[in-house]
Amino acid sequence: MTTTKLKNKTRLPVLLLCAVALSIVALVGHPLIPKKRLLITTSANDYDIASTNLSDGSLAGKWVGNNKRQFTCLYPENFDDPNYYCSWNRRFGWQPEGVDLSKFHTINIKIDYTGSAAKLRLFARNYNSAYSKRDDFNSTKYNAVFLPVTELKNEISLSLNEFAVTEWWLLFYKIPRQLAMPELNNVVTLGVDFSYPMTPGLHQVTVEKIELVGDWISQKMWYLSILSLWLFGIFTYQLNQLRLARKQLSEDSELIFTLNKDNKHLQEETSKFRRLSTVDPLTQTYNRFGIDQVVNALIAAKTHLSMPGEIPLFCLILLDIDYFKKVNDNYGHDVGDTVLQWISNNIQEELRSFDYLGRWGGEEFLVVLPRTEMYIAFDFAEVLRKKLASTSIKLESASLQVTASFGVTSCWDGDFATAFKRVDEALYQAKNSGRNRTVIAQERAEAVSS
């Protein structure tokens, strides 16, 4: 394993622990993220009072001095008007496009109230083209939440989920059930007013603070993001593992291909050297070692052979070129090599597919004839002898006549050394008997001449 792989394997648990630790910190750290805030009570130019006309024609609602966040609402004694209203409004422009307050989750309120009312009402009017008309401000959905005055002594925090749509508005505009839920995604007006029935007297309200609070990213989205990062990390890791596996597979395949190629080359080289170790390079026949391998294989297979009748395990023909030294002396060793090749080619042309030929040494050749009777071996030797004697070698400036002497024997028991000794003696007899003849190495063998 390489150093890089070891480093990667060591680094992975550390990275995993770091990722787990960061995830835990992120899970518990969401409340520590700074909040998104929208302060409503900032500009005085967008405030107004909407109120009913009293009996004397004056308005019920009035500003207190120049402070546009402080107003009074008068409800005279014996004034019984179910349509009475008096409200402080923070308008975001009477346009179909308001502000999206649904992105916030909390509203912080600080209101100072003096009067006899038991509760105030915080409302938000939402424009929706499905039910709102531009020429009818009251057609904007009236979302409201009641504020008991006993809780207004201190700043209070409300959830936007506390807003509800007033029943009178739903009934008046005949809003279907599917559209009856609160909506704060397009608020055109946010304000404070009183609910009916009103209590007589003067009511003074100071809107000190209205602030919306939300998350830049919701807790749900925060956790979903963490989960998504983990899934992305796992996917990326698996994708990288797949890439590394494919790379490793490619490298392994290339290595296997190289090894197979090298192995094939080695096999070819081995076969080449094995062949060179058993083949005579000049005549391309077996050398002495090769013949030994052939004979040993024939002897080893003896126990597996079914030998009907009296058939030897193999017969040997040993031949020696007559007066070969004179050829080398008179014509040179190049011609001598040509003679050896010519002899080898002529013998191989007559061999059967299962016969073997080897250069035993110098100008001697040994023929191994498996499962062959003696008379066949003798006839074969005679065929070879006569063929050589009747054919001349064509040289550049002359023709050369070459003959050979032959010894023949059989081997029944697989004793190659003894059989070779006999065939060598038979060849010696053929040489001493005048050459160019075949002698059978048997007890009553006779020399046969052409």
Image: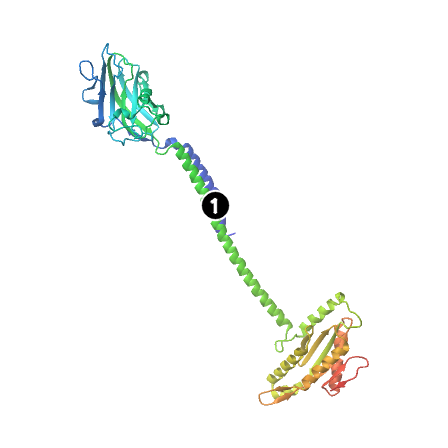
Residue 43 image-quadrant placement: top left
Q: Is residue 6 left or right of residue 45?
A: right
Residue 30 image-quadrant placement: top left
Q: Nearer the viewer, residue 419 or 67?
A: 67
Residue in the image at 38% along x and 30% along y = 31
Residue 147's spot in the image, x, y percent? 32, 19
Q: Is residue 358 left or right of residue 163?
A: right
Residue 135 image-quadrant placement: top left
Residue 218's spot in the image, x, y percent? 37, 32
Residue at the outermost right position: 444
* Amino acid at pointer 1: Gln
Say which quadrant the C terminus sits in: bottom right
Residue at the outermost bottom position: 398
Residue 394's spot in the image, x, y percent? 61, 87
Residue in the image at 46% along x and 47% along y = 239
Residue at the outermost top position: 78
- Residue beneath disc 1: 238
- Say what secondary structure mark 1 lies in: helix
Can the viewer see residue 22?
A: no
